[in-house]
Amino acid sequence: MEAKPHDGCSVTIPLLLGNDEKQHELSLEEAEGVDSIGCHSITGTTSFFKTCFNGLNALSGVGILSVPYALASGGWLSLILLLIIASTSFYTGLLIQRCMDIDPSIRSYPDIGERAFDVGVLEIFGLRIGGRQCFVLIVSLIILPTVWLNSISFLSYISATGVLASFLILGSILWAGVFDGIGFQENGTLLNWNEIPTSVSLYAFCYCAHPVFPTLYTSMRNPKLFSKVLLLCFLLCTITYASMAVFGYLMFGSEVESQVTLNLPTEKISSRVAIYTSLLNPISKYALMVMPIVHAAENRLRSCCNRRWLSFVISTTMVISSVVVALAIPFFGLLMTLVGALLSVTGSILLPCMCYLKISGTYQEFGFELVLICGIVVMGLLIGITGSYTSLVQIIEHL
């Protein structure tokens, strides 16, 4: 009986089936199994828990320091916006998984764009890190060895340090409030309409890890568990973000800085632990965030370069370019706020929705799912436009 390869996988599907009804149903189930997980389950080696560490590290970044300021900007009711953005980002993460289930040849975030629109428009999303002068150079030397690791499984150990750092920061802030005399006496405001755009933009910045999701999906030993990975990661990160926002706002009220560590008394041990631990977040997640970009560049240049050195050169170039930009632009932090408002919302909300509509063909049938996704797109556009406007105003003020 002749066999036909399915989408480049080693699994084969018989062209001719027997007349037995049970054999026919079994063959259909096998074919559907290939369609549902494709090649991803064959090549993946990363366990469920290691993938969770990578996912948590991608989501729980430096945004944990800014959520108290976001809450202070928008008021207590803006916590509802945090939950809405978290739920929306979780749903768009599931849409990315569905896109990869539909087409097993999709291996990365750029592949989704190429499959939907026949152009590689997504390679620019996923890179955010910076610093100042000599500190930038020191951090880059620390980060450099991590980007040479080309294994998601190995990166999970580095991700574990980033996850631990986030929980340690939260614990240090709580300790400072309870035992270091700061207290939780601030009442805050219920709602501040004028600062809602700033609040929403900062909340959205906390959930912009979607460019990493396809890489995590394809690395899993059992990709069918990826939805559970997303649920666990988003649930834990949202609880952490909300807790940090509430603690920071109760401790410092409207006086909270853009990074809550700036409010802490430097002479206290808990403050020093929080400040120094916050440095681990960008260091631990840089390699994970640039991996989709490195893989996309490798796929473009693989035919003309030695594969052994290709990943090394691309990864090193990414670090050097980040250092150059961080040192050359005096208001790099404000620029990253603008980039975050534009690219974070685009990469984490808009593009997953648009690509899913195109790949699945949902846009051709009017229904609840189409209405829901269109509503998410409208919300993403509003967040991106208002956040970009606010960031531009701040940049102009600093010129």
Image (tube, helix red, strand yellow):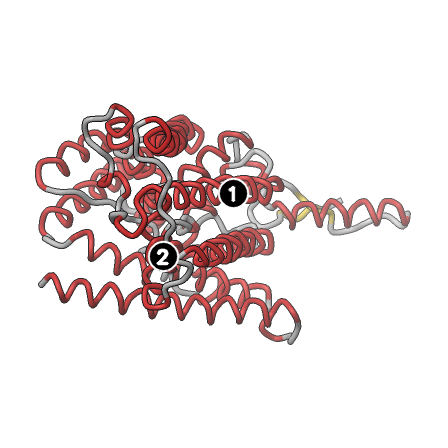
Q: Which residue carries the number 2 mark?
A: 344
Residue 67 spot, x, y in % from top left: 36, 48
Q: Nearer the viewer, residue 78 or 151?
A: 78
Considering the numbered disc 2 on the image, is that residue within a helix, a strand or a loop? helix
Assign the N terminus to one quadrant of the image: top right
Foreground residue, 318 or 299?
A: 318
Outermost top residue? 269
Can you see residue 308? no
Amino acid type, callout 2: Ser
Q: Report helix, strand or loop for mark 1.
A: helix
Q: Which mark is drawn over residue 217?
A: 1
Residue 310 position in % (x across, y down): 27, 39
Q: Residue at x 26, y 30 (%)?
A: 271
Judged left or right of residue 327, residue 361 is right
> Taking 34 as reference, is 273 left or right?
left
Up/down of 119 relative to 186, above or below: below
Residue beneath the point at 74% across and 51% down: 15
Residue 25 lies, in percent from the top left, at 83, 49
- CA distance separating discs 1 and 2: 20 Å
Q: Is residue 169 above or below residue 99?
A: above
Q: Earlier along the polypeptide chain: callout 1 or callout 2?
A: 1
